[in-house]
Amino acid sequence: MNLILLGAPGAGKGTLAAILIEKMGVPSVSTGNILREAIKNGTALGKQAKAFMDEGKLVPDQLVIDLLADRIAQPDCAKGYILDGFPRTIPQAKALDKIASIDCALSLEVPDDVITQRMSGRRVCLKCGATYHTEYFPPKTEGVCDACGDPLVVRADDKPEVVQARLNTYHETTEPLIGYYGKQGKLKPIDGTKGIDSTVKFAAEALGIEV
Ligand code: AMP
């Protein structure tokens, strides 16, 4: 199954993706994680992307379309994948339609005030991309990644002023994708406010899979 996770930044796409990859046996592809890795490694892509990301703006379409196309062409994506954070614009969705057949777009619905509160507790591992929350999804040892043992950090773009800019970008540019996939009959909205266990249950029901 080729699945898209739609939702505002901080809606819980990364956390849900981490659980669904276990249940569905397919990889998740996060363009945000690929870009952060590129910045960490100082690649040409990372250098181009950094200024946009630090300001909470979207990276230009062609850059992310190219990196996504390369990633889903890898052998581990042959049996399906979960897209987390792509597409984020109508041109990205149109480009995706040309190279992939999407089965479903799950839309995690969470109001802005809940997002703002959640972002303040979000912690990430820059090494493996795992995401935690100090209150809702804490690591076993405070400040340390369960998966790889690296220190957890606050993402530069989770700072409050940047969060507001990212929410504005989401409403202006990404939200229209809800209508785009609705028209294609692929949209499945789920409530993302009830905690991670409920979100997983709603997602599994929408996808018709066992949890
Ligand atoms: P995320 O981890 O998905 O919240 O993405 C973090 C940042 O990476 C975003 O605020 C954008 O600057 C950039 N980014 C990630 N995915 C995309 C995308 N599909 N299109 C444009 N920019 C992206």
Image: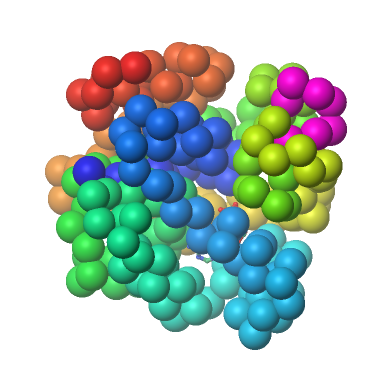
Q: Is residue 79 above or below residue 152?
A: below
Residue 113 screen position, x and y as percent? 66, 31
Q: Is any part of residue 42 visible from this angle?
A: yes
Name the residue nearer the viewer: 76 or 210. 76
The part of the image, by quadrant, that contains residue 15 is: top right
- Give the left or right position of residue 18, taking residue 94 as reference: right
Magenta region includes residue 16: no
**Residue drawn 63% across the image and 48% down it:** 129
Does 124 appear above or below 188?
A: below
- Which secondary structure dominates the residues rendered in magenta? loop
Residue 26, relative to residue 173: is it above or below? above
Viewer-proximal residue among 8 and 113: 8
Find out whether residue 144 is within the magenta segment: yes
100 relative position to 65: left or right: left
Ligand 1 - quadrant of the structure image: bottom right
Q: Is residue 182 above or below residue 90?
A: above
Task: Name which residue lies at 67% across and 20% down.
Answer: 136
Residue 175 in view? no
User: Quarter of the image containing the C terminus?
Assistant: top left
Q: Number of callouts in the render?
A: 0
Q: Which residues are magenta?
A: 139-145
Which of the 4 image quadrants contains residue 200?
Answer: top left
Residue drawn at (31%, 61%), measured in percent from left and top? 75
